[in-house]
Image: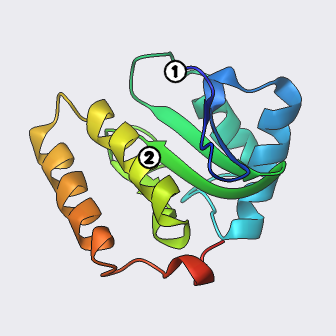
Amino acid sequence: MDNEKISKMDEQILNYIDMSEEQRINALKALKSIGFYPAYGTEKTMRRIMDKSVSGEIPQFYFVFRKDRLIGYLFIIGDDQKYKAFPWLAVTNIDELPMDITRFLMDILIKACNGNANMADLAEKLLAEYEIRSGHRPDDLCR
């Protein structure tokens, strides 16, 4: 996927595949600052896994920036047994991001789950809950 931008704000959503080497290094280092740690390993472990991602296939790794500062992530793994560092089908902090970004990322997740109806259905239900602000921060309290 090409670099995607949310035009209303200063946010930019980038797929790891489309990021420069410097952006990748900075994003992986910044994950700790927003509360993400891999289940196993370090930045180096995450990087080895992320470097294997291929456009159009799972896993995919998205990062959300505001003026070059990391504020969010969506990692679509698709297999909770494949990687020790990422033992989830997907992991994200979209509940901490403004709702327009949450919608955009959930759309990416739902489209990526086209081969897994259960995962896509769960993502759609979660988005419906977020739309009524159940489990999602009000925009004025978001990152």
Which residue is identified by label 1? 1
CB within 8 Å, label 1 to label 2: no
19 left or right of 81 in image: right
The location of residue 7, given as percent across then percent down, is: 63, 43
Vertical position of residue 48 compared to residue 2: above or below: below
Res 18 → quadrant: top right
Residue nearer the viewer, 138 or 92: 138
**Given the image, on which type of amino acid does mark 1 rest?**
Met
**Given the image, on which type of amino acid does mark 2 rest?**
Phe
Please give the label number shown on residue 62: none
Residue pictured at 25% horizontal, 35% vertical: 113
Residue pictured at 62% horizontal, 50% vertical: 8
Quarter occupied by the C terminus:
bottom right
Which residue is identified by label 2? 104
* Mark 2 element type: helix
The residue sitting at the top extreme is: 55
The location of residue 94, given as percent across then percent down, is: 48, 62
Q: Is residue 84 visible?
A: no
The location of residue 78, given as percent across then percent down, is: 32, 38
- Looking at the image, what colour scheme do you see? rainbow
Res 82 → quadrant: top left
Q: Local crowd at mark 1 within 10 Å, few (<14), some, or many (≥20)?
A: few
